[in-house]
Amino acid sequence: MVWDRYLGYGAAVGATHLTSAVLDLGMGNRELVWSSFGGTWHRVRVRYPRVWSRYGRTPAKLILRAVIAIVVGGVLLRFAPGGLDSLPDIDGSGRQLPDAVTSAVLAVGVLLIVSGLYRLARTLVDLATERTITGEVLWLEVWLSTSNDSDSSTPWLHYLAVDDGTDDRTTAWGLPSEWANRCHDGDTVTIRVRPWTRRVVDITVVGHGQARELVEPPTGDIAAPARPALSADLLTVDEVARALGRPVRAGDSMALGGVLGGAQFLSADRGKPLLLVQALTGTPARWAWRANSRGQALPGIGDGAYASGDRAALRVGETTVVFTLMGEARDRQAYLPWLAAQCAARLAAHHS
């Protein structure tokens, strides 16, 4: 009431730390959110799945529902025709139930079996096709809650919208509510997800955004370490073009919070993201290494390196570098070890 629009201006430039921490000023339209992931500001359109039987659900519940549907459908197919014919004559006319009723019951049984088998197969495929995504948190809010007796509710599932830089549209994921306090809007996170159910099964924060800095004092080595080498300095455009097999250009570099350096390499013709390189130090570096040190080990690269799918990670001293192939470049996974070797050599020279 006193400061009017100047309060919003102060929040935008980070001058109203206390007010921004106390007041939830919100982020405007949740379906069209600004993102700075990749070093340039852009708007991302977010779709939020409605309450449906599979979204955000655990495999155990989905498999149980599928089995129940198959069993009920089998019972209907096995016993319904004879059971309907044996029903007593209600009106005394001696007529049996019409064939249409029997056919409808059989159709329901077939539908239950087919839907149960489909749901069971998709759940198993969903478990086998987990993937890892790194991006910026755009929106986090309660999705589903359980009502309590005291006119209150306990949330058990949150919406988590993440921009991974591959498209200007995305669909929110289902994040278990017990993990909701791990990240804030603007944080850079690595999440492991199941695509069909849109459920997050693991989340790691690899970089903090401004929202966390407003409400949390810096602690430990997160606020103190030297700034890592900018990711754009670790690989040249020619090296990336050679590895990806197409002309590329360097996107804008970014350096956040003193512990995170990042850069994107874009296609030269359409400007689509092809490769994201992130260099981290301090606690975020350890988190990132713990989340990405899996898959195929790459001996002889830095102090350790791994490749898994469209992602590779290496470590040199206290620095962790994560490479992520995006968009049309996802088919160049075989060249990730070569990129990691080039980067490790340059990073070792930088440290020396």
Image (cartoon, helix red, strand yellow):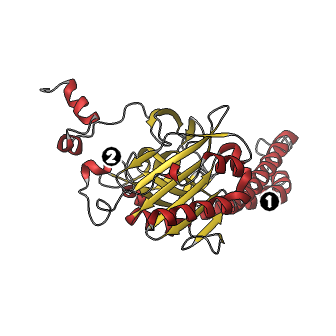
Q: In this view, does 158 lie to the left or right of 195?
A: left
> Which residue appears at 31% of the width and 51% of the height?
212
Q: Mark 1, residues whose alpha carbon is within 10 Å: few (<14), some, or many (≥20)?
A: some
* Residue 221 coordinates in the image, percent (x, y): 31, 65
Cβ–Cβ under 8 Å for marks 1 and 2: no
**What residue is shown at x 17% (from left), y 44% (from top)?**
18
Question: Picture coordinates of residue 330 (x, y %)?
Answer: 70, 50
Count up the numbered dots: 2
- Which residue is found at the position 78% from the left and 48% from the top? 111
Q: State whether residue 347 is above or below residue 264.
A: below
Amino acid type assigned to the residue bearing label 1 in the image: Gly
For residue 220, what is the image quadrant?
bottom left
Q: Distance between the residues labelled 1 and 2?
A: 56 Å
Residue 242 falls left or right of residue 215: right
Query: Which quadrant of the figure contains the C terminus?
Result: bottom left
Looking at the rendered image, the quarter that the N terminus falls into is top left
Q: Is mark 1 on a helix, strand or loop?
A: helix
Of 311 and 215, which appears nearest the observer? 311
Disc marking residue 202: none
Nearer to the camera, 40 or 350: 350
Which of the numbered marks, if any, corresponds to residue 210?
2
| Horizontal arrangement in the rendering, residue 142 relative to residue 213 (left or right) | right
Camera sees residue 340: yes
Tell me the residue that label 1 is attached to: 74
